[in-house]
Amino acid sequence: MAPFVLITGAAGLIGHYLIKTAPRWAPQWDVRGITRQDVDLTDAERLTGVVRSLKPLAVIHCAALSRTKDCEQDPEQARRINVDATAHLAQLSQRIPFIFLSSGEVFDGRTGWYGEMDKPNPINVYGQTKLEAEQAILQNPGHTVVRIVLTAGISETGDRSFVEDMCRTAKAGKDVTLYADEFRCPIPAGVIARVVWELVDRKQPGLYHLGGNERLSRWEIGETLLPWCPELKGHLMKGSARNHIGSPRPADLSLRYDKIQNLLSFRIPGFREWLAGRSRRGADLWDYLDGSP
Ligand SMILES: NC(=O)c1ccc[n+]([C@@H]2O[C@H](COP(=O)([O-])OP(=O)(O)OC[C@H]3O[C@@H](n4cnc5c(N)ncnc54)[C@H](OP(=O)(O)O)[C@@H]3O)[C@@H](O)[C@H]2O)c1
């Protein structure tokens, strides 16, 4: 039997892509995904039993309360899964490689183009819990944290990525307001999966940033998606973060990613470039197997 990697959050957006892309990008690994149905990670006793019986040789931890709004509404639940369960799982994985997906939301977004050496300063509950989890994980020099940003893709449940959110809203006949003064470096989930699989084998633990190589405003992202998602036509509204109501949102979460790029066998694409490449090849927009530009 091949050595196996345990993936948490397997029913979520990125966990699902990791599982689907493993035969292509990590054929040397056997993969087992666990979902909330298999084990609620906040049940520490059960989690301990599952990990001890499965005996994985590496763990990729994707499970989280990943929506900013949900974390703001229930900070205690956010802490239980994002910090406590994560720290516990890392502890259970102390002798094996452990990769944790964190977020650019650990920054306040005032400057943008954040590097790994920049000082985090979260402005919402989600960012705060991610930062605390990172601090627990990075105490182990064999473990890895990858901070990612706005992730595009198609989930099994159809309600996980920002693209799915936008399309669902538009299909319901509602307008989608996109801020022209809020910036991200969107990246497809297939690209993240390919990067993470390469990282598993590089054996170079530590803290990494991973974003697409193009900084776009939310408004530009919406315009870019229009030819691909016709349902958005007539429903995109240009807005400003100055009028935002709700949980605090960092203005600019562009990330410098040269540290991780130097480890990879391929170049991380920009979002528009990635979409254009797919258009040229007539590829399916969210093809699971394709993490290339
Ligand atoms: N997607 C992005 O744009 C983005 C950006 C930055 C960072 N990240 C981080 O990347 C990681 C993966 O993100 P994602 O987009 O794949 O998230 P996702 O689609 O929300 O998936 C997270 C998964 O975790 C599961 N989960 C939550 N609480 C759990 C619990 N107590 N026990 C077991 N499973 C539990 C969820 O199960 P249910 O379906 O049952 O709720 C869900 O399947 C997360 O750590 C996220 O914070 C994502």
Image (cartoon, rainbow, N blue to C red):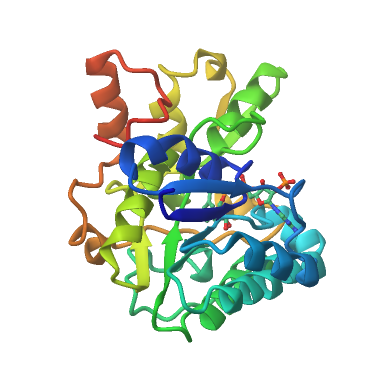
Please identify the residue farthest to the front as the structure is shown: 1
Q: Is residue 263 visible?
A: yes
The answer to whether 74 is drawn above or below residue 195 in the figure is below
Q: Which quarter of the picture shows residue 73?
A: bottom right
Measured from the top left, where is residue 188 in percent x and y?
40, 39
Measured from the top left, where is residue 33 in percent x and y?
58, 47
Q: Which quadrant does the C terminus fall into?
A: top left
Measured from the top left, where is residue 246 in percent x and y?
72, 55
Q: Which quarter of the picture shows residue 175?
A: top right
Q: Is residue 152 visible?
A: no
* Residue plotted at (70% across, 70% down): 48
* Residue plotted at (33% across, 47% down): 28
| For residue 282, side relative to residue 227 (left or right) | left
Give whichever of 181, 248 is nearer the camera: 248
* Residue plotted at (29% across, 46% down): 214
| For residue 160, side relative to residue 182 (left or right) | right
Q: Which quarter of the picture shows residue 280?
A: top left
Measured from the top left, where is residue 185 in percent x and y?
38, 49
Give whichever of 109, 24 is nearer the camera: 24
